[in-house]
Image: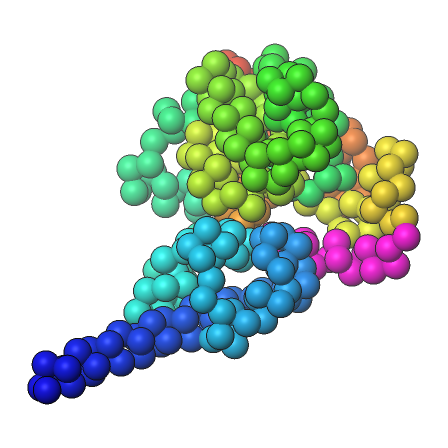
Amino acid sequence: MSNVINTQESSATKEAEVSALIARVGERVRKAREGKGIPRRVLSEISGVSPRYLAQLESGEGNISIGLLQRVAAALGLRIDMLVSEDDPLTSQALQVVDLFRKADGDVQQAVMRKLGMGRKKRARRICLIGLRGAGKSTLGALAANALGLPFIELNSEIEAQSGMPVNEVIALYGPEGYRRLEAEAIARVIASHDDLILAVAGGIVGEAETYAQLLRHFHSVWLRATPEEHMARVRDQGDERPMAGNPEAMDQLRSILTSREVPYGQAQAQLDTSGRDVDVSLGQLLEVIQKGGFLNKDGLKTHPTIE
């Protein structure tokens, strides 16, 4: 009889531990989402997890799979262990240090990296431009590469060349997960074949934490940013009406996406706001960022006039 009682108590203890874990994960997801000002609907769009499932998760009722939880963590700019560990890393000193590093200027970040022994060799002379569509990645990337005598590659073009079909067809055929796999493979090929280049990547690359981490390890990164209004206007100037077509909430959604990605985009080594600036001014500022950041050897830089 005592063995039966002990078994029942052990089972009840395990169930209580599981319930406590589910509640802890849900609370941290909710705190992280609210802390970043991300509506649940937008988190659903970014992570691919349904709003109903997210609501259950945040209330402590959803027994989410590891795969889906990884998507949620990536969408929040967090490591998955931050959501499941017994200690709350969301309020830890380490996270505060990460936040301070993210907000520091380029000189401070470089000094910290040198102090920690994080060398440049792994990044070689590779530069990556990140940010939402309409920030100027393609335009400025091509112009800067020409000014510096470097190759310029758009990662989506690399994916299309490898798959033999346009990106929208890749997504339609293989789904978002298939596209992310091809995206990771394309980055690996670029790293293996180029030590000198400027690369422009799609804005959603931050949704796959491992791929984005690989990108940051092997490239000097610059976040090109702009206001939501300018992002939208530039996309429409390119002849694409899809962002606004039949969607009166498009601008609000864009603002939410920008807010949700501030943390992962903020991990870039440098930032450049292109809002309200013409191409020549933004190009001059990008070249200045590259030079001041030491992303290239001195001999790799061409002279470019200072734009007042």
Please report the residue visible at 36 percent of the width from the left and 57 percent of the height from the top. 81
In this rendered view, identify the residue nearer to me: 253 or 308: 253
Residue 216 in sight from this viewpoint: no
Q: Residue farthest to the front?
A: 1
Q: Is residue 256 magenta?
A: yes
Number of numbered discs on residues: 0
Q: Nearer the viewer, residue 160 or 148?
A: 160
Left or right? Give the position of 121 relative to 291: left
Magenta residues (range): 246-262
Residue 265: image location, x then y, percent:
57, 47
28 with respect to 201 (left or right) = left
Q: In this image, 65 relative to 76: left or right?
A: left
In the rendering, at what x and y percent does residue 120 appear? 38, 29
Residue visible at 48% across and 14% down in the picture: 193
Q: Quadrant of residue 152?
A: top right
Indicate the quadrant containing the N terminus: top left, top right, bottom left or bottom right: bottom left
Point out the image quarter for the C terminus. top right
Judged by its main secondary structure, the magenta piece is: helix
Where residue 285 sits, quadrant-wise, is top right
Q: Residue at x 56, y 39 (%)?
A: 177
Q: Residue at x 44, y 41 (%)?
A: 210
Name the quadrant containing residue 213.
top left
User: Does the segment drawn in magenta span residue 119?
Assistant: no
Residue 99 % position (x, y): 46, 58
Q: Could you say which is closer to the camera, residue 134 or residue 125?
A: 134
Residue 229 spot, x, y in % from top left: 82, 51
- The answer to whether any part of residue 118 appears in the image is yes
Answer above or below: position of 186 versus 267: above
